[in-house]
Amino acid sequence: MTDLKSVNYKNVSFWLVWLALTITAAYLLYDYVIKNTGFMPAQPIQFSHKVHSGDFGMKCLFCHSSAENSEFSEIPTTYSCMVCHIALKNTSELIKPLNVSYDSLKPIVWKRVYRVPDFTKFNHKVHINSLIDCSTCHGEVEKMEKIFQFRPITMSWCIDCHRYPEKYVVPARDISGIFTAGINIDSLHLYKKKYYSNVKPAYGMWLSDNYESEYLKGVVSPRVFSRANENCSVCHY
């Protein structure tokens, strides 16, 4: 005779396991397919941003110059790389693909890390001209050996940043090359304290007392980030 309690327990166990697997699958789908954070594709050249930007101090806009004046931020061409590497053209295996590309006139096919749908527009120029640092979306690239997707770049994340910039926005840093200029950090500190001391919450590290903070270097004038436009046409046009 079948034990009904045993059958019920088996049914309950089955559905609990099924529910757990479904929730796990849904989370992984959202995290890795929709959010895509942490995505790190293998590239044709082992290019280290940590070496170029972190160790040698190359500004973001030195290679990605169009980000300041265009909707799109271009991937540097082989010729852009050879501006420096023409003098370093050697037999190293790491740089061999670059030499081959230069000699054969065939472009390097880099694998895209950040991608938005065709019906969505992200205007780099607008954000850069608003003194929003590259690391706001891309993270501290100067510390990355390999580039990976730092932010989810989903509609909900972008809207959240537009509504609450204090949660995400990092003011322009010197390493990004955004409107850098020789300024007196002490004078800037006194100015911003006088006019923005009552602003709460502080945006990024804007009200930091740390004079030497990298978040203060290179900023031409004090600025407080405000809520951005949330109209559909801002991104969908």
Image (spheres, helix red, strand yellow):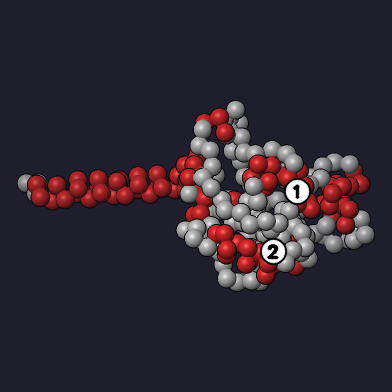
Residue 82 position (above or below residue 216): above
Image-quadrant location for residue 133:
bottom right
Residue 177 position, x and y percent, is: 74, 56
Q: Residue furthest top?
A: 237
Q: Residues within 10 Å of mark 1 (few under 14, many from 20)?
A: some
Q: Residue at x 63, y 66 (%)?
A: 189
Q: Which mark is residue 217?
A: 2
Residue 120 appears anywhere in the view: yes
Q: Name the image quarter holding the C terminus.
A: top right
Q: Residue at x 75, y 41 (%)?
A: 69
Between marks 1 and 2, how big is the CA–CA gap?
20 Å
Mark 1, residue position:
64
Residue 24 position, x and y percent, is: 38, 49
Badge 2 marks a residue whose secondary structure is loop
Q: Nearer the viewer, residue 231 or 221?
A: 221
Q: Residue furthest front?
A: 194
Badge 1 marks a residue whose secondary structure is loop
Amino acid at circle 2: Lys
Q: Residue furthest left?
A: 1
Image-quadrant location for residue 185:
bottom right
Residue 131 vs residue 80: left or right?
A: left
Residue 58 position, x and y percent, is: 78, 60
Residue 201 position, x and y percent, is: 47, 58
